[in-house]
Amino acid sequence: MSDQVITEVVGRTLRVTFNRPEARNAMTFEMYQKLAEAAVQVDADPQLRALVLRGAGGRAFVAGTDIAQFRGFTGEDGVAYEQRIDEVLGTLAAVDKPVIAVIDGHCVGGGLGIACCADVRIGSAASAFSVPIARTLGNTLSANTLRRLVRAFGEPRTASMLITARKVDAQEALDSGFLTAVAEDLDAEAEALVERVVSGAPLTQWAIKENLRRLAAGGPVDDADVVSKVYGSQDFANAVEGFLTKTPVEWTGE
């Protein structure tokens, strides 16, 4: 199992590679656990600035959950499964540092749920997005997973994707804002994106993520603690001085 999800520190990033290319990187329950552990790991290490997710093999990011694991499922098993997926995706969505998804090929079902938890997503022209359960398994999504899809694609497009089991191609994903770039050279685009992210102000990035999470929860948002932390930081003070004196700033996250 350890080879099916590869985690490695590269520079200031933790990189996660879903590594079952023979199965289009379909997720086992153990792989979901490994993903959740990586989400915790990146926040625990002050030297790391971002989490990068990618699938191996060039044919898929993640082609859903391994269907063999559903044999013999009962209704109660289904509830437990969806709750577990909610826990894993919730852990990924709660990461304080930027999460980047680099998508080449199919991004299906649970894979699309994972991609929805990223802050920035880029793809190749071959990337395609779908949740074809109305034609394949006849199962469903939890309300929390559905909410993530609606936030990422909008309700009309999400409804059409799920009810008609249609694919969204790379261009439509770009037009919808789900992808920020469709690249001919995905490796080069990914490295440029990673460098741009890790060279940014970490407290600014955290603050944007945190307030987006609070906004998604609905209702009035009290962000005084977030604003105070950022404006009261040494990074902000150093950046103001650096801007005025035209000297470079090295972000510390403090």
Image (cartoon, rainbow, N blue to C red):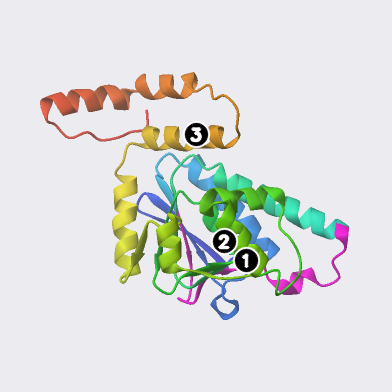
Residue nearest the observer in this picture, 206 or 38: 206
Which residue in the rendered view is the most extreme toward the left? 246
Is the residue marked by circle 2 packed among few (<14), some (14-19), or many (20+) residues within 10 Å? many
Amino acid type for the residue under numbered disc 1: Val
Q: Name the residue carrying label 3.
A: 210
Q: Is residue 74 shown in magenta?
A: yes
Disc 1 element: loop
CB within 8 Å, label 3 to label 2: no
Q: Is residue 111 shown in magenta?
A: no
Amino acid type for the residue under numbered disc 2: Leu
Q: Name the residue carrying label 1.
A: 131
Q: Which mark sits nearer the N-terminus, 3 or 2? A: 2
Disc 2 element: helix
Position of residue 222 measured from the top left corner of the image (x, y, whole percent): 53, 21
Q: Name the residue carrying label 2.
A: 112
| Residue 95 placement, left or right of 75 | left
What is the distance, in whole Å, between disc 3 and disc 2 at their CAs?
A: 22 Å
CB within 8 Å, label 1 to label 2: yes
Give the residue displayed 47% in from the left and 38% down from the top. 209
Tell me: residue 202, above or below residue 38: above
Position of residue 188 measured from the top left corner of the image (x, y, whole percent): 29, 65
Q: Nearer the viewer, mark 1 or mark 2?
A: 1
Amino acid type for the residue under numbered disc 3: Glu
Is the residue marked by circle 1 packed among few (<14), some (14-19), or many (20+) residues within 10 Å? many
Q: Nearer the viewer, mark 1 or mark 3?
A: 1
Residue 161, image quadrant: bottom right
Region rendered in magenta: 52-75
In this rendering, does residue 116 appear at all? yes
